[in-house]
Image (cartoon, grey):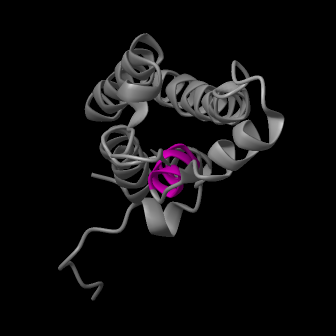
């Protein structure tokens, strides 16, 4: 497996793992992507699976499309999560109480994986150095 394909494969696997990691910590418990918005999380998961299938069959167009689409979906999900956190306590008529409860919602480390996976997949897709792409571990040049 070439290095660029391996990087793209690792990026899609990290994206799948990131969907199960905590992204928002409410007052009690923590949320992953599926707790935030289940259908949207399934779409991110399916795009990552299609990207993995593209890396297995070495289809560069599928890898490129999946990598960019997954990055766009994660960025959009990040903005939607910010809006959800800011709007979650607007039903409370006392604004200082709503502001206090909103301050208790914290973003967690799962966002690093959600953004790192597509960026790694895009980096693998953009890697064009022939010396690195033809590298085989354990093989020495004589």
Residue at x-position 46% and y-position 19%: 37
Q: Position of residue 110 (x, y in %)?
A: 44, 52
Return the residue nearer the eye: 3 or 36.
36
Vertically, is 139 above or below 111?
A: below
Q: In screen coordinates, is 125 left or right of 47?
A: right
Residue numbers of the magenta segment = 110-120
Assess whether residue 117 is covered by the magenta stretch: yes
Residue at x-position 46% and y-position 47%: 27
Q: Position of residue 128 (x, y in %)?
A: 59, 54
Q: Position of residue 46 (x, y in %)?
A: 36, 18
Q: Main secondary structure of the magenta part?
A: helix
Assess whether residue 89 is covered by the magenta stretch: no
Query: Residue 119, can we see it?
Result: yes
Q: Position of residue 48 (x, y in %)?
A: 39, 29
- Residue found at the very far right of the displayed protein: 95
Q: In screen coordinates, is 44 left or right of 34?
A: right
Q: In screen coordinates, is 92 left or right of 32?
A: right
Residue at x-position 64% and y-position 36%: 78
Which quadrant holds residue 82?
top right
């Amino acid at each position: 497996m070439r290095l660029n394909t391996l990087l793209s494969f690792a990026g899609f696997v990290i994206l799948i793992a990131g969907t199960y990691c905590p992204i928002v910590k409410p007052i009690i418990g923590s949320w992953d992507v599926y707790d935030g918005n289940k259908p949207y999380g399934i779409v991110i998961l399916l795009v990552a699976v299609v990207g993995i299938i593209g890396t297995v069959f070495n289809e560069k167009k599928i890898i490129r499309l999946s990598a960019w689409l997954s990055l766009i979906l994660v960025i959009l999900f990040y903005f939607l999560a910010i809006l959800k956190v800011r709007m979650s306590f607007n039903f409370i008529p006392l604004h200082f109480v709503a502001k206090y409860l909103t301050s208790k919602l914290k973003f967690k480390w799962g966002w690093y994986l959600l953004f790192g996976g597509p960026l790694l997949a895009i980096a693998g897709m953009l890697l064009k150095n022939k010396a690195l792409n033809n590298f085989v571990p354990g093989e020495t040049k004589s």
